[in-house]
Amino acid sequence: MPLQPRPATTRPSPHLRELRDTVRALLGLDDDTAVIIRQFAYTEPGRPPLETVVAVLSMDGEAHRWTLHLPADQITEHDLRATLLHHRPN
């Protein structure tokens, strides 16, 4: 069965780029460290309908992950500062 081509990906929103830049600045990351921000939707009872995961992957293989229980478009610099600097990553 031949694989179907993937649909064209869209460029990240300006807000997601801003969040990624803020994560880099808050954590003092270099350009070789990947910052990934993804929003997930859930339908299970007891879970927020949307949450956003911030992952940081360094070249030495060390990875860190934080979960914010907010949609990505509602996350502010204050939210990132409170989460990244005051909570241990998963």
Image: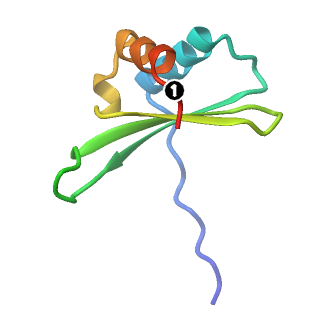
> Which residue is rendered at x = 58% and y = 74% of the image?
4
Image coordinates of residue 42 in percent, x first then y, are 27, 54
Relative side of 14 to 42, left or right: right
Nearer to us in this view, 67 or 14: 67
Task: Name, please, the residue furthest toward the left.
Answer: 45
Q: Is residue 80 above or below residue 3?
A: above
Residue 3 position (above or below residue 15): below
From the top left corner, tell me how far across and down residue 7 is, in percent. Answer: 52, 59
The residue to which callout 1 is attached is: 88
Q: Nearer the viewer, residue 88 or 26?
A: 88
The residue under the point 45% across, 38% down is 53
Q: Residue at x 40, y 11 (%)?
A: 77
Q: How many marks?
A: 1
Amino acid tagged 1: Arg
Up-down relation of residue 13 to residue 40 (above or below): above
Where on the picture, by quarter, is residue 1?
bottom right
Q: Is residue 16 left or right of residue 61?
A: left
Q: Viewer-proximal residue, 30 or 48?
A: 48
Q: Residue furthest bottom?
A: 1
Taking the image as shown, residue 5 lies to the left or right of residue 7, namely: right
Q: Position of residue 80 (x, y in %)?
A: 43, 17
Image quadrant in which you'd find residue 70: top left
Element under disc 1: loop
Residue 78 occupies which quadrant of the picture?
top left
* 63 lies above or below 27: below
Tell me the colour scheme of the image. rainbow
Q: Residues within 10 Å of mark 1 (few under 14, many from 20)?
A: few
